[in-house]
Amino acid sequence: MIELNGVKTAFWPERVRIMDVGPRDGLQNEPYQLATSQKLALIEGLVNAGVRWIEATSFVHPKAVPQMADAAEVSAGLPRGNGVIYYALIPNEKGYDRALAAGIDHVGLVISVTETMNRKNINLSVAESLAIAEKVIGRAKADGVKVRVYASVAFVCAFEGRVDPARTIELTDKLMAMGCDQVCIADSVGRAHPGQVAGLLGALREKHGTERLAAHFHNTYGMAIANTLTAMQQGVSFFDASIGGLGGCPFSPGATGNTPTEDLVHLFHQMGVETGIDLEKLCDISDMVKDFSGSLPPSAYYRATRVKKAS
Amino acid sequence: MIELNGVKTAFWPERVRIMDVGPRDGLQNEPYQLATSQKLALIEGLVNAGVRWIEATSFVHPKAVPQMADAAEVSAGLPRGNGVIYYALIPNEKGYDRALAAGIDHVGLVISVTETMNRKNINLSVAESLAIAEKVIGRAKADGVKVRVYASVAFVCAFEGRVDPARTIELTDKLMAMGCDQVCIADSVGRAHPGQVAGLLGALREKHGTERLAAHFHNTYGMAIANTLTAMQQGVSFFDASIGGLGGCPFSPGATGNTPTEDLVHLFHQMGVETGIDLEKLCDISDMVKDFSGSLPPSAYYRATRVKKAS
């Protein structure tokens, strides 16, 4: 608890860690396809801006996600010797092998909290996904590789609706017990509200502390920044975001994507919380994304500062 | 203090009041000009959606704000017999006379917290503006009219930068002492962050309670919802918003406008806080705004629910 301008607030960290998931979660949900060289230019920009955690690509089958078919090429071209830690998404042990062969540092797995979403997403039961996670975590411990697992649709499921927090807590308990390095509580469809975020993350903090927790929000309903603030006040200090707000929501065609990294960094810097990231360099990358994609990134900070009046 | 999902939170009201300022603050900052009939259609839509406080127009000089030249016509055409309370902005006693002659219920005045902004905006010192407010408040008491004063640039000034909360508190103290019915703490340039909001509104609550406080945010940097949440947690329960997110920021050409009413209502409803407003009917009005303006309203809720995939 700290005091800010005389007001007692909940947790208010000095510093937070930010993972940019734009190259994977963002690009995967965009209608266009970038060349490998464009993806690497984007990643290099993130590195130069001071981003230290990057979800670089995904080793799922190219048929499932054609945007990530160049996962090995992207991995081979990653800027090194800079302290940046690269994650890749993997679906299973085979993906784990491919990711490690390609030189990726650490891996992420997605498990949906609801059976319906897990089935629709990866055609497995939650129990089957947990069994895969357990095997991957075991091998990763031996290999010195970290495993983060997304607890997907942690608040609301596109099929089952509002998710009972007890279910997300149960999944997290199991992952924590397996020795999972980080559980990323993900509002995958962007429908969580701050009341849910406070309740769930407060409960998880009390059970597990926050050292191994991360939060991942989408801005579908414009609540990503409010949800991030709320998660921070519950003690979370590791957040996902995507440069420019890349991404979208397969269930809301007009919706924006992940929390824009610029908006998240701006929020934290305004509140006196360090990120180690240079906001203007982030906007330079969004300029590049704008050129690559031909459309204006949804980041509010980007639009407020980089769009000039039509003359 | 209430407990939500087992987490102790600060103030969490059962119900909030929302003033839609789209017909005035919103339209005044849009590049196009609506016909009086279009403005009235928009206001009628708000009334039908359950909005009970509407800032309908402004009685400033038409040379200063040409978009509001039809203030008397708009006032004459307002839907009545429905319990809706209509406010109009006025610059001074002359504006007060015109507003009352036109049949407006209550009035609003703008005073900037900083001398530079007050001078640039209305070419008066803050002391001169306070003297006008005092006269208007005196007459209004006798007339049974309510006066709300916007404490403009309450957090950040486009010219003077970060505003010392002591200055906003001092202005608010003076207005409260005059018997001002409501002081609306306004982040006019959309640059406030939740730390500032918590600090200032917490301090104002301790001095004055929250019965006569309102909060007014712009979404320029994507923080309007986070700031609203924070103000609510400090005990504020009266909020301004504009339908669809109408409006803009004269200092940020690419920026969006006021807090979109849909997004605010959605936030509150998700959190179990009543507004009395029908969210889908609000979106119907934004459909109308889209047709009037030829561009997509910035409301996240609107975009997530009303934009269909291009087929």
Image (tube, coloured by chain):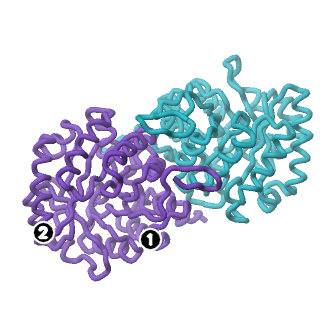
Chain colours: A cyan, B purple
Q: Which residue is mark 1?
A: B277
Amino acid type, mark 1: Ile
| Residue A209 appears in view | yes
Task: Establish if B53 lies above or below A119.
Answer: below
Left or right side of A77 for A95: right
Residue under the point 78% across and 46% down: A172
Q: Which mark is residue A32?
A: none
Q: Are marks 1 and 2 on the same chain?
A: yes
Q: Quadrant of the N terminus of chain A?
A: top right
Question: Dot 2: what SS?
Answer: helix
| Residue B253 appears in view | no
Task: Establish if B283 lies above or below A68.
Answer: below
Which subunit holds the residue at mark 1? B
Q: Name the residue nearer the viewer: B236 or B120.
A: B236
Q: Quadrant of the C terminus of chain A?
A: top left
Amino acid type, mark 2: Asp
Task: Establish if A245 lies above or below B269.
Answer: above
Q: Which residue is mark 2?
A: B143
Task: Report the Cα–Cα distance between label 1 and label 2.
Answer: 30 Å
